[in-house]
Image: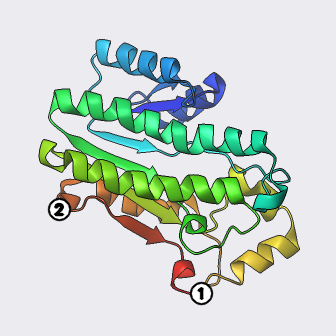
Amino acid sequence: MIIADRDADAAASVAAEIGAAARAAVVDISDEASVEAAFADLIAAGWSPDVVVANAGVQLFGQDAKAADLDLDVWRRTIDINLTGTFLTVKHTVRAMLASGGGSIILTGSPTGLNGEGQDFTAYSASKAGIHGLTRTVAAAYARDGIRVNTVVPAYTETGLVATISDDPDSRAAIIGRIPIGRAGSPADVEGVMVFLASEDAAFATGALFAVDGGMTNL
């Protein structure tokens, strides 16, 4: 298992928690040279990607905004990491999977790219909508090559990405109030669907969005 992050210490820490089956790799997904070099180094060391999860992203609280108020640099930074970074990960994963006989690619979407949930986060919402479209396009293009591409769409999930919300009781209560199940999501809530999509049990699933959002996108 490869744990990739642009933060070498963070990647090494997670790999150490997993144990001998994991190793860390330093990758800046917004930089194609970094992505290409990482894939080349890992493949040269004997790694063959059968499952790749593209989960890196940013949500720039206090900077992302409604379209008329959004600074172009914030737009570009968000798109560069969330959408272009996902594309570059997918591009080089597909190249490797074509050589190895196929596999499963799992992307991370968001309700903000589906239902207007992120009206104050124009760049983030657009980046996630782009990921949803990328899923369908790449899935259709490589289905006959044995490559499956699906996206998991979590609702508000309490990780470091959304500390701005989780540390503010009023903001947290407001967003949880829009989730029919009545609680925040956790990483564990998403793991099961990703394990399914990684497995042969999902052999006929490709080009799909799997909502794990407590019913949020059904409203």
Residue wearing tag 1: 180
Looking at this view, name the residue that lies furthest to the front.
Answer: 68
Query: Whole-percent x and y of residue 83?
Result: 54, 44
Read off the residue under disc 2. Answer: 204
Give the CA distance from mark 1 to mark 2: 29 Å
Crowding near the residue tagged with mark 2, few <14, some 14–19, many ≥20 C-alpha atoms within 10 Å:
few
Quadrant in which residue 38 is drawn: top left
Residue at 56% across / 69% down in the picture?
A: 111
Q: Where's the N terminus, which quadrant?
A: top left
Give the amino acid type for the residue marked by disc 2 in the picture. Answer: Phe
51 in relation to 159, above or below: above
Callout 1: SS: loop
| As drawn, 161 above or below 88 | below
Res 201 → quadrant: bottom left
N-terminal label among 1 and 2: 1
Q: Is residue 86 left or right of residue 99?
A: right
Give the x, y percent position of residue 147: 22, 45
- Say whether residue 201 is left or right of residue 32: left
